[in-house]
Image: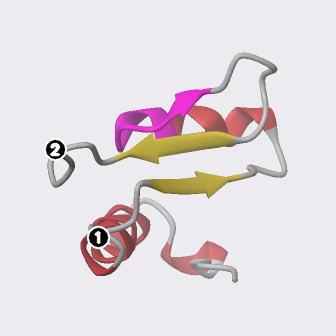
Amino acid sequence: HYVLVHPDYHGRGIAGKMMEMVKEKYKDYLYIEIMPEESRNAAFYEKHGFHAMEDGVPMQWCNFSNRT
C-alpha cells in the first residue's frame, strides 16, 4: 500500500499526520515496515520513529508497549 501526498501539498504537515494515522491504525502490530524509494526520504521516517535495519533496508517502527 502507498500513502502519498501530491507535490503541490508538500511541506504542510499532511504526510506527518497520515503517518501518525497509519501508526495508530496498526498500533497492535509488532512491526510496521517501510521501504523508501529514495534515501533522501529516510529522514522523514526517522522523524516519525522508524530506524534503519542492520542491512540498511527496509526501515521499521516497532511497538513493544502492548507485549508482555
Q: Amino acid at mark 1?
A: Lys
Q: Quadrant of residue 66?
A: bottom left
Camera-side residue of 28 and 12: 28
Residue position for label 1: 17
Q: Is residue 18 left or right of residue 33?
A: left
Q: Amino acid at mark 2?
A: Thr
Residue position for label 2: 68
Instruction: Return the x and y of residue 62 as percentages of the image width and height.
Output: 39, 43
- Check disc 1 and report its element: helix, strand or loop: helix
Q: Are marks 2 and 1 in contact (CB under 8 Å)?
A: no
Instruction: Return the x and y of residue 6 as percentages of the image width and height.
Output: 62, 82
Image quarter of the C terminus: top left
Instruction: Return the x and y of residue 31 as percentages of the image width and height.
Output: 48, 53
Which residues fall within the magenta stretch? 45-52
Q: Is residue 23 left or right of residue 9?
A: left
Q: Nearer the viewer, mark 2 or mark 1?
A: 2
Q: Which residue extends farthest top? A: 54
Q: Which residue extends farthest front? A: 68
Q: Is residue 14 left or right of residue 53?
A: left
Reading the chain from its start, which is encountered first: label 2 or label 1? Answer: 1
- Check disc 2 and report its element: helix, strand or loop: loop
Q: Quadrant of residue 21?
A: bottom left
Camera-side residue of 36 and 6: 36
Residue 50, magenta (yes or no): yes
Q: Residues within 10 Å of mark 2 (few under 14, many from 20)?
A: few
Q: Quadrant of residue 61?
A: top left
